[in-house]
Amino acid sequence: MRTKEIIIASIMLLGSVLPHSALAVEWAAEWIWAKERFTDPNTWMALRKEISLDEKPQESLAYISADTKYWLWINGELVVFEGSYTGGPSPVKPAPRTDFFPIASNKYYDQVDISQYLTEGTNTIAALVWYYGDNGQKGTHISSNKGGFIFQANVGDTQVISNDSWKVSPHPAYATKVTKQSPYRVAAWNINYDARNSMGDWTDNAWYMPGYDDTSWQQAKSLHRPPRAPFNALSQSEIPILNNYGLAYCENYPASKFPFVSNGETIKCVLDFNKNVTPYFDIEAEQGQTVHIDSNMRLNTIETEYTTKEGRQQFESYSWFNARTIEYTFPKGVTVHSLKYRWTGVGSTPGHFEADDTWFTRIWQMAENTLYICARDNFMDTPDRERGLWIGDVADQASYLFYSMDKPGRDLLKKAIKVTLAFSDSETGIFAGLGPGRFRELPAQSLQFIEQGIWHYYYNTGDRETLEFAYPYVHKYLTLWGTRENGLATFRSGAWKWTDWGPQDTIDYDVIQNALYYSALVSARKMARALGNDTHLSFYDSRIAALKNRV
């Protein structure tokens, strides 16, 4: 029995560290889009393909990617809600980095089992793709400067690939000319949707349903196969598609409260706790009226404006925001049949803590949820105003990640490590402290990231492959510090010498950086020993000893 357990554990560990190159897809599919010379930022594109199967497949894995996000339906059933992770995985080629000048990036693809959605006979595959065309001021995304979608699946003896046989149409209800909210830090856009131009969305006659007449749609244009530019090479996402918890009623607006007639005042729809959500409504209205949706969060910059069509209509705003309360404003006289929201996130939080003192239990719940809402395309500082991969925030999150989140959360930390280091400066070895798109050296956060991010990840997972990737970057960065005559490390200001949101430019800065440098040296020495690499041990030993002697 013990031997069997060891074998199973070994297989599981092997699967968690297997190089992506060993799992690489041989792409026959082509990137596709509408025929156009230039893709406007904030473009929404609908795509369809019908296939015929002799029998229902036992297993069928689809490989899918987009610039930037996609929603997938098969036979009218939602399969993927907001697919395609942004921010990585690697530059097309290493290069010297300059802030505000992102370098060309490869992309992720999702792997999705679609077998349960397919049937014998005719099947309809449909996707809605949202092209950002914007990197965001905090570098969370690197655009290809072209919208695109790619799909490949082996379905029994049939290979289904995206090519010029697919049909495409710009979605006419989504406005492209949308003004972003100041301070313009988020790559995603507000939603401006005119239901008078809808294609049956959220009805049984929707464009993504079987039988929809797409004869007026244009044939897709092929944009070449991977790894050609502008989308470059594709790597499998290390994170599964988002966990979709489904549509739910708000706490103060259960099903029993509907329907009612709006008095024109803002309706505050309260969630049971703070979540990352997409708001939904079901109303009856005259055409041409304006509905507004916002979050109660003070720094939220994502809002929705919806123009009604005549009669009964449903709508879900696909640009997620963070909220404790969703604020719906309907014109006076509109009949409201339902108000809901969809909660989505990376993996789940099976970790549990409970104490006799309810205050401690509540603190745990709040901390755990703070971690969860800051985990999506990457670990981020906030889910509203920036959504940036600040590596100091990632280091803080890593400290309690392993007590709370499941494997997708750990994989998201692995992504943060790989992206930060892969987009580092190729000449100096300075970390991309706000990767992948921005390049700012943050010495205190970089040192903290070495211990709390990289070492803690390895310590808790045993992922040797990631440690082998990370270690050369760690060592090179630590050699950028010199040693003063008194044994202390020289001070690096970097692009920002910030250490915390307390009083700035205090005498503590030098002490704090030396303490963090010491911790990073100790962690790097542990990494070297774990890898069986004694090349740099004397460097670590001498630096650690010199700092110890100054305490």
Image (cartoon, rainbow, N blue to C red):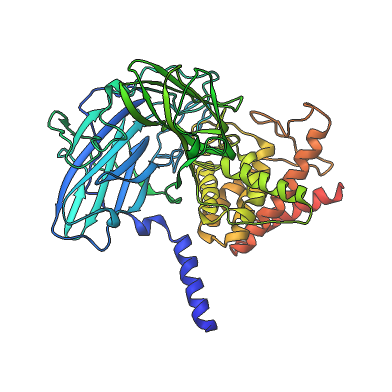
Q: Position of residue 72 (x, y in %)?
A: 31, 42
Which residue: 31% across, 50% down?
Answer: 63
- Which residue occupies the foreground of this view, 212 or 262? 262
Residue 518 or 114: which is nearer the viewer? Answer: 114
Residue 194, image quadrant: top left
The residue under the point 74% across, 56% down is 541
Residue 328 located left or right of residue 116:
right
Taking the view exactly as shown, the residue that stands out farthest to the bottom is 1
Can the viewer see residue 431 in this picture? no
Residue 122 left/right relative to 344: left
Question: Residue at point 41% right, 33% down?
Answer: 318
Question: Which percent across, then down, holds residue 215?
Answer: 12, 32
Does residue 281 appear in this view? yes
The residue lying at 56 percent from left, 26 percent from top is: 300
Residue 113's spot in the image, x, y percent? 33, 55
**In the image: residue 171, left or right of residue 375:** left
Please say if 192 is above or below 46: above
Question: In the rendering, at what x and y percent does residue 546 appear?
Answer: 81, 49
